[in-house]
Image (cartoon, helix red, strand yellow):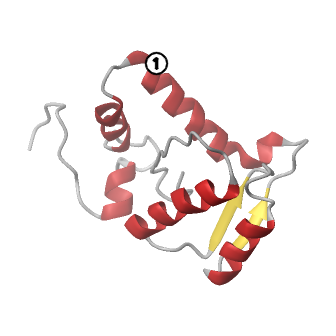
Amino acid sequence: MDYYSKFIEVDPLHDLSSSATVDAVKSQFSRHDIPEKLKTDNGPQFSSREFSMFCEDYQIEHTTSSPHYPQSNGEAVRGVKIVKRLWEKTPDKHLALLDSRTTLLASCDLSPAQLLMSRRPRNKVPTAR
């Protein structure tokens, strides 16, 4: 989850190894860009030497949340809850994500997609032009 825009990206991982995680993260970065800072939980895939080398190579400041204090990674935990709730309720997971990304945030009357892309993406929800 992007902390600024609240934009959620999801890559289902069937393999939680460091190499699979690095591949998924690289895929995200190829779509959006390489962040300066990355905050993750303290999972073994993020605390491995391979992931550390990846962050060093990409010049990313990597911080991890405390394993005994999950609230410190609250934004990511909230994003996971949102996606799980969405996917329980719909057969079309991609459309559910699109609808979530294009729903206005109460704090600024813009959607996560508008904040991230500076445009209003089209979805199937009828709206006034």
For the point 57% across and 56% down, which residue is it?
Answer: 3
At 53% from the left and 27% from the top, the residue drawn is: 84
Quadrant of the image containing the C terminus:
top left
Percent across and percent down for residue 101 are: 36, 44
Q: Position of residue 90 (x, y in %)?
A: 35, 19
Q: In the displayed image of the protein, which residue is found farthest to the left? A: 129
Residue visible at 68% across and 74% down in the picture: 55
Vertical comparison of 104 with 5: above or below? above
SS class, disc 1: helix
Query: How many marks can you see?
Result: 1
Measured along the vertical axis of the image, is residue 30 above or below residue 24? below
- Where residue 99 appears, as percent x and y from the top left, is 31, 36
Please name the residue shown 71% across and 66% down the image.
51
Which x, y percent locates residue 105?
Answer: 42, 43
Q: Mark 1: which amino acid? A: Glu
In the image, residue 116 sits, relative to residue 57, either above or below, namely above
Q: Which residue is mark 1?
A: 88
Q: Residues within 10 Å of mark 1 (few under 14, many from 20)?
A: few
Instruction: Pick out the residue farthest to the right.
Output: 68
